[in-house]
């Protein structure tokens, strides 16, 4: 391959092997991860296994496992199996872990057993950003994302879904009973085989019906009348028109450096009750007296905005459009301009609308023009 840049031979040996550190530039983010984790007091944060056991096989130090976990988070590698493969071939991860290659089960167990401690590490990072002056503008953007749970839709039940499932099983049982009567009228040898097969199916369906009745009792005891069998905390949420069993992950991000200031996981399908909680968490984490929180119209709720105002948080949220006037080809309230000095509205045609009366309906004061 002449006239091309050629690589070295795979079998070429060198007198002095290259240092692994030479492959990692000075500006590589893994150096920051390495220094940050080394400065943490893992025992004080609550990590298990900081003090090694006297007997048994030596374990990996939580310091190394935390570095691998943070690296996977920074590079969108969530799977423990993928992290295991990356530890064997990724030069950055080799440098970060000292060429240690824990298996996927060890990585998964570390994540499972140290959840609360990892949250405290996130708080330490936010505190570090605060000390470095990265949160000077005190403005955050709040948004939510639906994260799919392990729980399948077939193992999530609501009252309507449970009732529909029971009706389907009852119809199947009735259909098999009818087929069983038909089998009795057939020839003896064939009828015996068919009857045994149908009877087995009926037995399975009745056992399933009994299981659903047990689930119904548990369902009626839950506050939100919903139950998930695999992930008990997961809930069916409407996402892009489909009901998928998810978690609702809320995040508050600094608008200047795009750093995550606060995060929370809940199982509420709507974002309308999340604004004040996330804004107050961000305010506490940033240690500021006043904060500006920006969110989309999915967070608009008067009680939440009032709670933000009482906590000295300026909430910037567009109001939801509940009027059907635009869909019907008419003007709605947003097309009219209000003049506070004269207490009048100007219509799109340029005419003035004066106040006619004030009435109270259902506890609300209505101003009619």
Image (tube, helix red, strand yellow):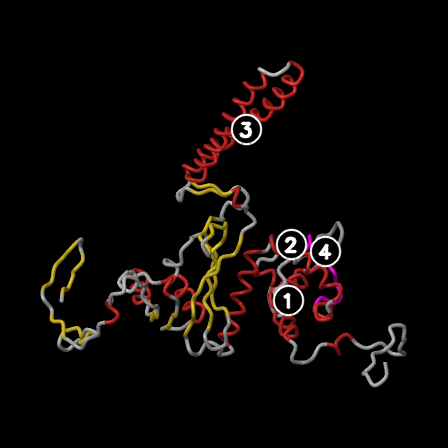
Q: Is residue 339 above or below residue 142?
A: below
Query: In which quarter of the view is residue 71 placed?
Result: bottom right
Q: Earlier in the sequence, mark 3 or mark 4?
A: 4
* N-terminal label among 2 and 1: 1
Residue at image coords 14%, 75%: 352
| Residue 280 rendering spot, x and y as whole percentages | 39, 65
Numbered disc 4: secondary structure: loop
| Camera-nearest residue between 113 and 318 | 318
Can you identify the residue that label 1 sits on?
71
What is the x, y in percent for residue 82? 68, 59
| Distance (Cα) linking label 3 and label 1 | 49 Å
* Vertical placement of residue 362 versus 289, above or below: above
The magenta-colored residue range is 97-106
Q: Secondary structure at mark 1?
A: helix
Disc marking residue 108? 2
Looking at this rendering, what residue extends furthest in the bottom direction? 3
- Mark 2, Cα crowd under 10 Å, few <14 / some 14-19 / many 20+, is some
Identify residue for label 4. Answer: 103
Corner quadrant of residue 196: top right
Ranked by sequence position, the earlier of labels 4 and 2 is 4
Q: Is residue 94 left or right of residue 348?
A: right
Which quarter of the rendered picture does the C terminus lie within? bottom left
Q: Reading the chain from its start, which is encountered first: label 3 or label 1?
A: 1
């Amino acid at each position: 391959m002449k006239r091309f840049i050629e690589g070295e031979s795979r079998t070429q040996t060198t007198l002095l092997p290259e240092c692994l550190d030479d492959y990692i530039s000075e500006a590589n983010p893994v150096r920051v991860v390495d220094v940050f984790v080394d400065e943490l007091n893992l025992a004080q944060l609550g990590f298990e296994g900081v003090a090694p056991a006297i007997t048994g096989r030596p374990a990996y130090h939580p310091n190394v496992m935390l570095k691998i976990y943070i690296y996977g988070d920074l590079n969108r590698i969530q799977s423990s199996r993928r992290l295991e493969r990356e530890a064997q071939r990724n030069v950055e991860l080799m440098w970060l872990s000292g060429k240690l290659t824990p298996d996927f089960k060890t990585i998964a167990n570390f994540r499972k057993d140290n959840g609360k401690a990892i949250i405290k590490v996130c708080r330490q990072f936010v505190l570090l950003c605060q000390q470095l002056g990265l949160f000077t503008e005190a403005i955050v953007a709040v948004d939510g994302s639906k994260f799919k749970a392990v729980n399948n839709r077939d193992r999530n039940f609501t009252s309507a879904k449970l009732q529909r499932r029971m009706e389907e099983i009852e119809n199947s049982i009735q259909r098999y009973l009818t087929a069983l009567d038909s089998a009795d009228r057939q020839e003896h040898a064939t009828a015996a085989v068919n009857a045994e097969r149908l009877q087995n199916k009926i037995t399975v369906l009745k056992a399933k019906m009994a299981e659903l009745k047990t689930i119904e009792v548990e369902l009626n005891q839950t506050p939100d009348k919903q139950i998930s069998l695999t992930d008990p905390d997961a809930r069916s949420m409407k996402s892009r028109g489909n009901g998928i069993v998810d978690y609702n992950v809320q995040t508050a991000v600094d608008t200047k450096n795009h750093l995550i200031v606060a995060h929370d996981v809940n199982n509420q399908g709507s974002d309308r009750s999340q604004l004040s909680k996330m804004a107050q968490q961000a305010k506490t984490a940033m240690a500021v007296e006043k904060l500006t929180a920006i969110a989309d119209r999915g967070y608009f709720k008067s009680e939440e905005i009032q709670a933000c105002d009482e906590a000295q948080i300026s909430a910037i949220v567009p109001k939801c459009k509940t009027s059907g006037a635009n869909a019907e080809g008419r003007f709605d309230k947003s097309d009219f301009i209000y003049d506070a000095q004269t207490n009048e509205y100007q219509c799109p045609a340029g005419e003035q609308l004066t106040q006619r009366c004030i009435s109270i309906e259902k506890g609300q004061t209505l101003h009619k023009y």
